[in-house]
């Protein structure tokens, strides 16, 4: 098992613990969630401040070029992770790739917006309380790594080979924090704003440097160069290695 894959399994376990802790706090100490409202973030300390800091650091790591400990799928927008193929790039095929993957990506976006709209309706009609919206975001935080390590429903639309080549890899925080937009307050809106910035950086880089995102122009994204080995469920090469080992 690769070092990054091991790290991701530990992170998944950690996120499950975080979700369980948040559920426990919601049941036993709902007053801790006061920091979600208005500027109460600055009035007193809550365990949620620690979670806020973790999320902010995670997002900053997606817009800063880092070679170690961050999977290539998240960092392929940067020039230091681009390895041009030896042969001439087929720009016509790359154009078709850009069009097809962008159409698929925004199908995912429309479906996600519909889901968030339903959550918003349930919140404003009183079915879901404020704390429930926060817990939904924490649940999405867990599901993010389930998509990477176990099974990803978005792959049914995206048709990508694996997470390394995924067109929407860094959309995770935007999707994760989208329910918080209904809550307002510094805690929630700061996370939403930073997630939008991460998404914008990703989308702008995709438009300006599409060759970095395509495995037929970026040799680092090809299976033969893979070191992350995150996607056991999709990677034939990795499954073959595990059977052989």
Image (cartoon, rainbow, N blue to C red):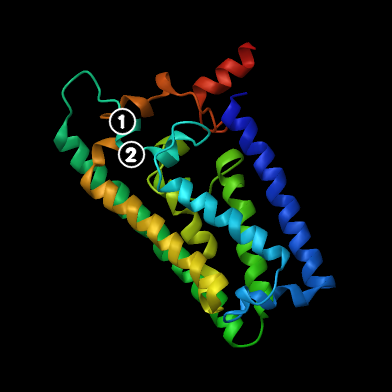
Q: Residue furthest right?
A: 28
Residue 149 occupies which quadrant of the picture?
top right
Mark 1–mark 2 CB contact (< 8 Å): yes
Left or right of 185? Residue 66 is: left
- Check the image and report above or below for 217 versus 133: above
Q: Residue at x 63, y 66 (%)?
A: 136
Q: Residue furthest front?
A: 43
Q: Secondary structure at mark 1?
A: loop
The residue at which mark 1 appears reads as 82
Q: Is residue 115 visible?
A: no
Q: Which mark is residue 70?
A: none
Residue 141 occupies which quadrant of the picture?
bottom right
Q: Residue at x 85, y 71 (%)?
A: 28
The residue at which mark 2 appears reads as 78
Residue 155 image point, x, y percent: 47, 45
Q: Secondary structure at mark 2?
A: loop
């Amino acid at each position: 098992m690769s070092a990054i894959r091991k790290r991701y399994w530990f992170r998944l376990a950690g996120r499950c613990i975080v979700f369980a802790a948040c559920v426990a706090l919601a049941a036993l100490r709902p007053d801790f969630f006061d920091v979600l409202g208005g500027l109460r973030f600055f009035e007193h300390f809550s365990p949620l401040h620690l979670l806020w800091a973790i999320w902010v650091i995670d997002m900053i790591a997606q817009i800063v070029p880092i070679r170690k400990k961050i999977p290539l799928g998240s960092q392929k927008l940067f020039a230091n992770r681009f390895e041009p193929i030896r042969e001439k790039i087929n720009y016509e095929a790359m154009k078709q790739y850009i069009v097809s993957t962008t159409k698929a990506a925004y199908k995912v976006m429309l479906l996600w917006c519909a889901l968030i709209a339903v959550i918003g309706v349930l919140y404003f009609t009183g079915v879901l309380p404020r704390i429930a919206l926060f817990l939904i975001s924490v649940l999405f935080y867990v599901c993010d790594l389930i998509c990477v390590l176990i099974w990803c429903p978005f792959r049914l639309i995206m048709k990508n080979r694996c997470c390394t080549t995924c067109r929407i890899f860094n959309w995770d925080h935007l999707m994760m924090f989208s329910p918080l937009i209904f809550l307002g307050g510094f805690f929630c809106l700061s996370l939403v704003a930073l997630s939008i910035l991460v998404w914008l950086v990703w989308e702008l880089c995709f438009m300006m440097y599409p060759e970095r995102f395509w495995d037929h122009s970026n040799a680092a994204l090809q299976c033969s160069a893979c070191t992350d080995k995150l996607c056991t469920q999709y990677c034939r090469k990795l499954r073959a290695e595990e059977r052989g080992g």
